[in-house]
């Protein structure tokens, strides 16, 4: 190898070594700086990643999760989740996809598909418009509703109360369980009482118990559930419980003997 080539090889090696050393310095000091910045934010009460907040304050009007409650001892299919009984800490369902995009607890996926297939075979066109929702997603919906209420002139406290009447407080929605579905008619997709007049909803209310589902928030039962009438909201409870609940005109709270004195609200 000539002297000139040796010098070129040596230069390249020195250059690589210098670059490598520079990278180590940047990573060491830069990493310490980033760590310090994150630590500083946490010490100032910055929210954890994904925690829904509104105007710097937690969105929910209560703790998202709380299992220190006198819950009814029931099987998974009868799990009670409401504002009175918020989601148990750390509970995350194992999910399966139905209708190509919606997620539900994998244990009810077949029942969902059969019910909707049979409804379509009867000549109707039901569609899912909501299924599993994480606590974080519920927080986003709650914050959005609060924002609209404030734009309408309400202060923050009043906006929060107004939002809670329409959107479940994060941690208290049945959609967190993967056992609840909002199902509407393809030809009428509004979430209002008009949904009960659609042929799809009438078929579902008549037959849902055959697949293990109930109309979770019936008409005239707001005192028991704390939730307005929602003819579109179907909840899996298993065939035996579903038939008893639907035939006797009960709510899940009544069926479990868990109706609080002040209804579903705390």
Image (cartoon, rainbow, N blue to C red):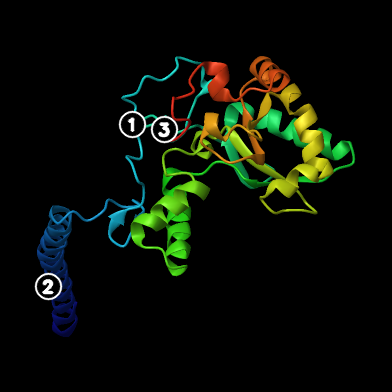
| Residue 77 is at least partly visible in this image | no
| Disc on res. 152 | none
**Residue farthest along the bottom direction in this orientation:** 4
Camera-side mark, 2 or 1: 1
Is 255 situated above or below 81?
Answer: above
Left or right of 6 in this view: 222? right
Q: Which numbered tag is attached to residue 18?
A: 2
Image quadrant assignment for residue 64: top left
Q: Residues within 10 Å of mark 2 (few under 14, many from 20)?
A: few
Secondary structure beneath dot 3 equals loop
Q: CA distance from mark 2 to mark 1?
A: 55 Å
Which of the marked residues, 3 or 1, is nearer the chain's N terminus?
1
Q: Position of residue 54 (x, y in %)?
A: 34, 59
User: Residue 206: x and y, percent?
Assistant: 79, 29
Q: Residue at x 28, y 60 (%)?
A: 56
Closer-to-camera residue (132/10):
132
Name, please, the residue furthest toward the right.
123
Circle 3 residue: 87
Considering depth in this image, is 36 or 126 the residue closer to the camera? 126
Say which residue label 1 marks: 66
Element type at marker 2?
A: helix
Q: CA distance from mark 2 to mark 3?
A: 55 Å
Q: Is residue 147 visible?
A: yes
């Amino acid at each position: 190898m000539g002297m000139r080539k040796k010098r070129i090889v040596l230069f390249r090696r020195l250059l690589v070594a210098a670059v490598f050393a520079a990278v180590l310095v940047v990573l060491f000091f830069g990493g310490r700086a980033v760590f310090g910045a994150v630590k500083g934010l946490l010490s100032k009460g910055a929210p954890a990643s994904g925690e829904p907040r509104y105007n710097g304050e937690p969105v929910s009007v209560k703790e998202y999760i709380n299992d220190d409650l006198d819950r009814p001892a029931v099987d998974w299919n009868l799990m009670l989740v409401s504002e009175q009984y918020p989601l148990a800490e750390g509970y995350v369902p194992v999910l399966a996809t139905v209708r190509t995009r919606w997620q539900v607890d994998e244990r009810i996926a077949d029942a969902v598909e059969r019910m909707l297939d049979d409804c379509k075979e009867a000549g109707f066109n039901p569609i899912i418009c909501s299924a599993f929702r994480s606590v974080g997603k519920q927080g986003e919906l709650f914050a959005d509703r609060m924002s609209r209420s404030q734009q309408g002139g309400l202060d923050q406290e009043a906006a929060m109360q107004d939002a809670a009447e329409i959107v479940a407080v994060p941690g208290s929605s049945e959609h967190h369980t993967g056992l609840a579905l909002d199902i509407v008619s393809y030809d009428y997709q509004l979430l209002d009482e008009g949904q009960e007049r659609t042929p799809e909803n009438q078929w579902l209310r008549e037959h849902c118990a055959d697949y293990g589902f109930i109309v979770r928030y019936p008409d005239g039962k707001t005192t028991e559930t704390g939730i307005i009438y929602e003819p579109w909201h179907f909840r899996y409870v298993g065939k035996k419980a579903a038939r008893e609940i639907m035939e006797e005109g009960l709510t899940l709270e009544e069926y479990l003997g868990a109706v609080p004195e002040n209804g579903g609200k705390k």
